[in-house]
Image: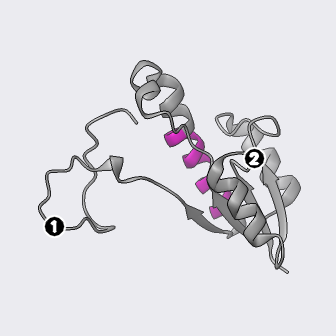
Amino acid sequence: MPKVLITGVKGQLGYDLERLFTAHHDVVGVDIADSDLTDQNAVRTLFQYYRPEIVLHAAAYTDVDGAESNEDIAFAVNERATSYVAEECEKLKAYLICYSTDYVFDGNKTTSYVETDHPNPPTVY
């Protein structure tokens, strides 16, 4: 069974992912109390210890309005932590599945957005 690391396991998405994957995978779920993903050394330690083959990165700062008044925290969680997770996945050659939101687009496109569209977020979130 592949070893799967799920970040943000106490959040709504992470919780559901853990329930879904546990039946067929060796799952390790972590949340902020287990590892501060905004700390590069903590992320490195986490990955060295668990050595996941697949990472479902569901950890995020999801308070849209709060992100505007807590820009530093939102950036640390949504950008920096994700970068650290991606770097460690690359080192281990682990698959990374990252979840996002359509808030990375400004909403001005008249057709559906696709993965190759350039992000232009109108807010910090």
Q: In front here: 90 or 20?
A: 20
**In this view, which residue lies farthest toward the top?**
69
Q: Considering the image in quadrants, where does the C terminus appear?
A: top left
The total number of labels drawn is 2
On the image, the x and y values in percent for residue 69 come to 42, 18
Reply above or below: 9 against 17: above
The circle on residue 111 is 1
Asked if disc 1 and disc 2 are in contact, CB closer than 8 Å, the reply is no
Q: In front here: 86 or 18?
A: 18
Relative placement, left or right, of 93 versus 64 is right
The circle on residue 44 is 2
Q: Considering the image in quadrants, where does the N terminus appear?
A: bottom right
Q: In front here: 25 or 37?
A: 25
On the image, the x and y values in percent for residue 94 come to 68, 69
Reply above or below: 34 against 6: above
Relative placement, left or right, of 33 versus 106 is right
Reply above or below: 77 against 56: above
Which residues are the magenta region? Answer: 78-91
Residue 83 is a magenta residue: yes
Q: Dot 1: what SS?
A: loop
On the image, the x and y values in percent for residue 73 come to 54, 26
Residue type, numbered disc 1: Thr
Residue type, numbered disc 2: Arg
Relative placement, left or right, of 29 versus 62 is right
Place residue 36 in its image quadrant. Answer: top right
Q: Dot 2: what SS?
A: helix
Circle 2 packing at 10 Å, graded few (<14), some (14-19), many (20+), is some
Residue 56 is a magenta residue: no
Q: Give whichever of discs 1 and 2 has the lower sequence position.
A: 2
The circle on residue 37 is none
Residue located at (57% from left, 43% from top):
60
On the image, the x and y values in percent for residue 116 come to 29, 67
